Amino acid sequence: MELMFSVALGILTSCGVFLILRARTFSVVLGLTLLSHAVNLFLFSMGRLTSGAPAIVGLTPTSADPLPQALVLTAIVISFAMTAFVVVLSLKAAVELRSDHVDGENPNEDRP
Amino acid sequence: MTHLMILPVVIPMLAAGWLLLNHRASIGRQRVWSILSTSALVALGVWAVIAAQVDFHTYWLGNWQPPFGIVLVLDRLSAMMLLLAALLALFCVLYASRGSDREGPHFHALFQFQLMGINGAFLTGDLFNLFVFFEILLLASYALLLHGGGRARSRAGLHYVVINLLGSALFLLALGILYGLTGTLNMADLAIRIAAASPDDQTLLRGAALLLMVVFGIKAAILPLLFWLPRAYSASSAPVAALFAIMTKVGFYAMVRVLLIVFGLDSVQPLNADVFLWLWPLALITLGLGAVGILGAASLRTMAAYMVILSSGLLMASFAMAEATILAASLFYLLHSTCLAAVFFLLADLIGRQRAEGYDLLSVTAPLTSRWVLGTLFLVSAVSMAGLPPFSGFVSKAWLLQNAIDHPQYLWLWGITLVAGLFMIAALSRAGSGWFWKPEPYTGRQRRRLDPARVATVSVLIGISAALALFAAPVMDYMSATASQLYQPSAYVEAVLGETALAKGGLTP
């Protein structure tokens, strides 16, 4: 399970970083979303991966660490709000600047 | 335990909530509430500074005991930052109440949310809570930056938002690593556990420390992470940019707090030594880049933005010298540079309004009204900013350079700081002579009356700089005590968790 988890994290993070480095706002927003997914999964795994163990002490011999779950919940809420904001902002920028380039203009547009 | 400690977070939160619910209230009532709330914060800041001189103060939120609850800690550094933020905010909100808050809706609500995030970040003693307060202040700052709209703001805002979202992701990664290794996020508890960590974990801990440095480096604008700043600060409206002068200092504060308390308890081989190794050259280059930027700036707002970068570079460089006496001097410089950077953002707007054309562009020579008043304000603040006597710029820089002289690498700091000062004098005198001496007297038909309230606000803020120089001795005593308190992390840990936790190596849930 650990191996699958870390491979998934690696793929998510590398796709996220690649997309953030693109020049169009749409891919940047997608990249930020993928990266925040990776971060949330990473935080979740910090309480160690356990299966079949609830986050309540005493129900089963082993119990999961509840704190990372709470942290992830906070992080999800924040990243959800931020993603919504950045989507609206990039739409606004695209309309106002008449370009969806992250700099508001394509530096190579006028070149022959 | 006193409930006053939570008020710097609760008052702006309630004020912002009231302002949001009553957004149809007349702008006059909104201003009154906003100014009242900010004045209350100033009073609380004064209380905090007085209270912090006695001892540490801790506040368990909801009375949840450690290690389960979140703790607020008031020490000398956080008290001083609370007072500085509140004072600066008061001037910004007074200036904004003269008209800039009409450019768009909800200015005052956003402003109060911003103050809530800033104050929370200064008070919290929990690393995840620091992240949450960072997000609050960032989200408010995104909206404040875009307040009023316009193409330049959209363009700068996009960069600002994206880089800060990336910073938040990295912050969470660092927190995840720290929690995974130590099982706690309370700063005091973390400090104990990091000091006692096994050698196998050192590499990961070092990674977490460097990640945190990157995160706070984005906020504080040190070298590879500063290119969002000039555009963002020069695009926002004057009072917002003036308030943002404290935002880079929030990054500096967080770096000081985390590096000296959380990573500094191990006296044999502290982890923060690695970070200082990186920070020292980067900060020096930032300092130089700020000076070049000031010389090359096309408008006064951009120049002020590069002044923020320069002061950030100088703060980081003196912090990276890792000595208590130098840190004391750099904290004094922090007070001075924050006030003066804010003054320049406000001055750019004040002068820009009186010029016939060109707003604050340095290349335009345009007649302006009230040239004597504005010229005097500009001269005094330029003298103070450039570090010439008799104002606070001189006192703080002289003290900083004097304290740094015992450090083996002091020549780097001396050389770059002094050359940067020279660049600043050149740029400011060019701007001043081009604006106040060159143009013909104002003969335009359109009356441009100088707003006395705005002038008074800026003058009082400049007066604080003079007061810092006049009453330098008590301030310097306070700063020295603050720096030595920061260099004794065990006292912090003991105050937050008690002696027993320190002795037995952390709290066990």
Image (cartoon, coloured by chain):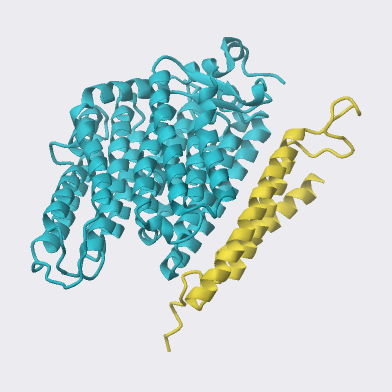
In front of the other: B243 or B217: B243
In the rendered structure, the answer to whether residue B218 lies left or right of residue B298 reads: right
Instruction: Please name the residue shown 27% across and 49% down the image.
Output: B453
Outermost residue, bottom side: A112
In the rendered image, residue B233, in percent from the top left (x then y), is placed at 38, 56
**As drawn, B498 above or below B339:** above
Quadrant in the picture for the N terminus of chain B: top right
Q: How many marks?
A: 0
Q: Give the colour of chain B.
A: cyan
In front of the other: B231 or B218: B231
In front of the other: B253 or B149: B149
In the rendered image, residue A80, in percent from the top left (x then y), is placed at 67, 54
Quadrant in the picture for the C terminus of chain B: top right
**As drawn, B499 above or below B35:** above
Instruction: Please name the residue shown 48% across and 53% down the image.
Output: B26
Q: Can residue A53 be seen by looking at this rendering?
A: yes
Q: Give the colour of chain A.
A: yellow
Instruction: Please name the residue shown 91% across and 28% down the image.
Output: A59
In the rendered structure, the answer to whether residue A62 lies left or right of residue B27 reads: right
Q: Can residue A19 be seen by looking at this rendering?
A: no
Instruction: Please name the residue shown 46% across and 47% down the image.
Output: B29
In the rendered structure, the answer to whether residue B490 lies left or right of residue B461 reads: right
**As drawn, B65 above or below B319:** above
In the rendered image, residue B224, in percent from the top left (x then y), is placed at 42, 53
In the rendered image, residue B138, in percent from the top left (x then y), is placed at 52, 49
